Amino acid sequence: MSTQKEQDKPVVSGDEQRIADYLASHADFFNRHPDLVESIKVPHRSGNAISLIERQLNALREKNSQLKRQLHDLINNARENDRLGEMLQKLTLLLLKTKNLDASLLVIAKHLSTQFPNDATCAVLYEEILPESTVRTLTAPVRAVSRHDVGWQELRLVLDRGTPLCGRFKNGQLGFLFGARADSLQSAALIPLHRLDKAGQSPFGIITVANADPARFQANMGTVFLTHMGQTISCALERYLPNG
């Protein structure tokens, strides 16, 4: 006659018994395979309450998951920084090889179109600083607008500060830059183009990269790459601009 204890004893299959026997005879198994300890979940018989060991394991699993997410973010950021660095180096080399203003503007137009395929881009320059022949042959997304156009007043904050500004902008600001396309754009990076003269920084245009995603360009994002790109393009064009 079986006892109550024997009746409550779970039925163990042959495979399970072999596993149990193996673990019983190899007490150091989980020391040699610590990853398995983190992946195994053992429910506590008291219901919702969990043992201290389980609580510690859960905490370790959560910490491990958090560290993995952080490592994943760091790796992605490093890859993105490498990509941006290579992009800037390529642009710099191409601009160094140009021999005139028209060639430089063509390089910039191609760079914006190919390196930011998922964004809306434009480069707007003061019309007065460009030869008429150059204005007539500008290739999208590069164009020229008179410095007396009221649209430039919408961008005065960015032009005067001389450094890139990211975030969400007024409809008038993006409207001046992108026209009817501005209605679908929710965030942007504005990069002023300027040269140094006796009076300090003198703006002569602006480059804009915009996107329909409001989170694409945020006010608190880093602007080191954007700053370097703006300085590189400014220096490349300044060589061919008239004084004053």
Image (tube, grey):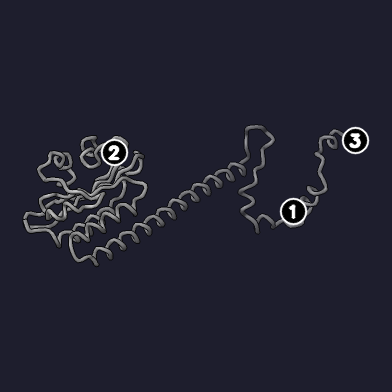
Q: Tell me the crowding category of disc 2: few under 14, some 14 to 19, or many 20 or more residues within 10 angstroms, Cα based.
A: few
- Nearer to me, 78 or 67: 78
- Nearer to me, 71 or 92: 92
**Disc 1 residue type (three-letter):** Leu
**Disc 3 residue type (three-letter):** Ser
- Nearer to me, 66 or 46: 66
Direction from residue 205 to residue 25 in the image, left or right? right
Mark toward the start of the polypeptide (3 vs 2):
3
Rendered image: mark on residue 23: 1
Q: Which residue is mark 3?
A: 2
When asked about the image quadrant of residue 110, the answer is: bottom left
Where's residue 30, x and y in %?
67, 54
Q: Quadrant of the N terminus?
A: top right
Distance (Cα) linking label 3 and label 1: 28 Å
When asked about the image quadrant of residue 133, the answer is: bottom left
Distance (Cα) linking label 3 and label 2: 82 Å
Q: Are marks 3 and 2 in contact (CB under 8 Å)?
A: no
**Disc 2 residue type (three-letter):** Arg
Rendered image: mark on residue 181: 2
Q: Residue at x 63, y 32 (%)?
A: 48
